[in-house]
Image: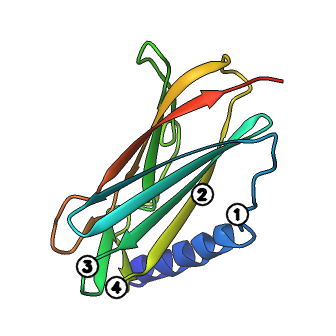
Amino acid sequence: MFKTLTSILVLGFLLSLTACGQEAEAPDENESNQQGVEEMNGWQLEVQVVQESEQLRVDMLLTNKTDEVQTLIYPSSQTYELVLTDESDEEVYRFSEGMMFTMALIEEEIETGGTQKFQESISVVDLEEGHYTLSAEIVGKPQNEVELPTTTIDVDITKS
């Protein structure tokens, strides 16, 4: 019991550290900005992708549009999944590939109208210039077990 509690506390501390200093910046005129929004079962998932030189910055906002405080339950420290596919529907990037996640139930309470924010960077150094599709999914589930929206958007990668 003590090990589980300690693991959860350490994980919470590490997650709070990784969130520090990740304030979103306004894109400049040389950056490509693409976004998509999906709503389902009282939840909204907004995804914005900005190409910054050799990186795609992916900002995800999950908003509770229900009339009640909701608790999301994550089965591990993985909170989202991102999959990038090329024009021939070949997977060229998966966030979780090669990653290890702490196996612990994590609960996040989101107030009515409240938003949970996530951010990830994807390197495009090894990718060809062209048209891609990004699928973003939150892997947690609300306590009432309803499905959360998945947002899929078109992304154009350019090289300078």
Amino acid at dot 1: Ala
140 w.r.t. 58: above or below: below
| 123 or 1: nearer the viewer | 123
- Secondary structure of the residue carrying tag 3 is loop
Quadrant where the C terminus lies? top right
Q: Whole-Å distance between the Cαs marked 4 and 1?
A: 23 Å
The residue that label 3 is drawn on is: 66
Looking at the rendered structure, the kind of residue marked 2 is: Gln
Instruction: Please tell me whether residue 62 is drawn above or below residue 124 in the rendered image.
Output: below
Left or right of 58: which side holds 73?
A: left
Q: Which mark is residue 119?
A: 2
Cα distance between the residues tagged 2 and 3: 23 Å
Q: Please say if the residues under marks 3 and 4 sit with CB atoms less than 8 Å apart.
A: yes
Q: How much space separates mark 1 and mark 2, taking CA atoms?
A: 9 Å
What amino acid is at disc 4?
Thr
Q: CA distance from mark 3 to mark 4?
A: 6 Å
Instruction: Residue at 46% x, 75% y: name it.
Output: 115
101 lies left or right of 40: right
Residue 141: x, y in percent?
26, 64
Q: Residue at x 44, y 17 (%)?
A: 90
Residue that mark 1 sits on: 24
Label 1: element kind: loop
